[in-house]
Amino acid sequence: MKRKTLTLLTLGFFLIVLGGCQTANQPIPQPNQPAAPVKFKVAVLRGPTALGMVSMLDAQPSLGENAQAEYVIEQSPDTLNAKLLTGEVAIAAIPTNMAAKLYNKGVNYQLAAMNTWGVLYVVTNGDEVKNWSDLKGKQIENTGQGAATDVVFRYLLNKNGIDPDKDVTIKYVPTPAEQAQLAIAGKSPITVLPEPWASTVLNKNQDLKIALDMQQEWVRINGADVPFAQTCLVVNADFASQNPVVMAKFMEEYAAAIDWVNNNPAAAGELIKKQDIGIPADVATAAIPRCNLRYISAVDAKPAVGKYLQVLLDFSPDSIGGKLPDAKFYYQK
């Protein structure tokens, strides 16, 4: 009996040791690596929306040994929207109202972070406009009637006691490119332009100047803690929940990329030209300081995003899908 017990104990000890050796010989998953290979698409719109990600488009930084991102520059909001509707893209930089509209349609994307805090300016030919009250009685050119940028301009007019339907004449031009050409030719005394078009016209016509900064006016009205939340980063909710390590690494790299662009506008301008984002290097270098690029997480940006979407809802409900998105719209790690 004793001999049998001793044999069993010896056998048990041998199995434990053997099992330990087998475990030791197996590869140990690294805490900063995804468990299985992950391939995914990251998309940006051609133009200023892509500025903050330009160094990532160029360097394609490592997001982990088993993670592989494919970066895509989309030519128009419509083509990117189609890919978001099918879930083809995991991460994308898009206008904030577009993100809300997708979410309200039931498309499975969340706002992951804010990247751009407004790129809108009132450009004039001469010195006739020095403050918002000087716009009263004037003709002003803009684009995208009923679109988000038009809504923001009308909102700011209202807040300055100017009725956009009675006190000014807003003439809508089909595209910012056409607005820019009119301004450069001296045929548009007052025009509302986004970057990089504002920098383009300033570069081409020395009589033109930025008269009003719409971002500064937004902050004056709403407070410094509620800046103009114009453009954001979205993530497919399933991708984020299934790949938290990759997502965390991407967000870290993206925040660093935005800082790099702000600190190196000339070098960023050259990369923007190289990546064919649609902005000449010299224009991009001049525009970057006025693009208000800044990374803020979705949770921290929630008050600013909520205010912006509320303004759009009040003026143009369709621009965000008819309602404010609920709390699940905001991605949390």
Image (cartoon, helix red, strand yellow):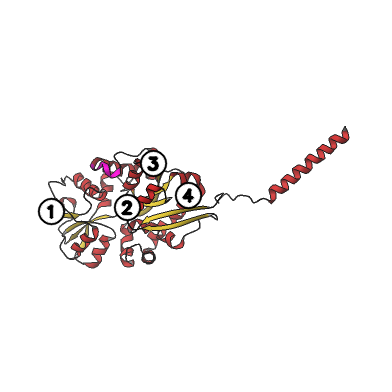
Q: Main structural element of the magenta stretch: helix, strand or loop?
A: helix
Q: Could you tell me how far apart the alpha carbons at marks 3 and 4 are, in whole angstroms?
A: 16 Å
Q: Is residue 201 above or below residue 234?
A: below
Q: Could you tell me residue 137's position as x and y percent?
A: 11, 51
Residue 279 colored magenta?
Answer: no
The residue beneath circle 4 is: 247
Q: Could you tell me how far apart the alpha carbons at marks 1 and 3 are, in whole angstroms?
A: 40 Å
- Sequence-wise, the earlier of marks 3 and 2 is 2
Which label is found at residue 329?
A: 3
Q: Residue at x 37, y 45 (%)?
A: 301
The secondary structure type at the circle numbered 2 is helix
Q: Residue at x 72, y 45 (%)?
A: 19
Q: Could you tell me how far apart the alpha carbons at marks 3 and 2 are, in whole angstroms?
A: 21 Å
The residue beneath circle 1 is: 138
- 15 or 191: nearer the eye? 15
Camera-side mark, 4 or 1: 4
Tag 2: amino acid: Asp
Tag 4: amino acid: Met
| Quarter of the figure that contains the N terminus | top right
- Sequence-wise, the earlier of marks 2 and 4 is 2
- 120 or 273: nearer the eye? 273
Tag 3: amino acid: Phe
Which label is found at residue 72?
A: none
C-beta proximity under 8 Å, tags 4 and 1: no
| Span of residues in magenta | 315-321
Tag 1: amino acid: Lys
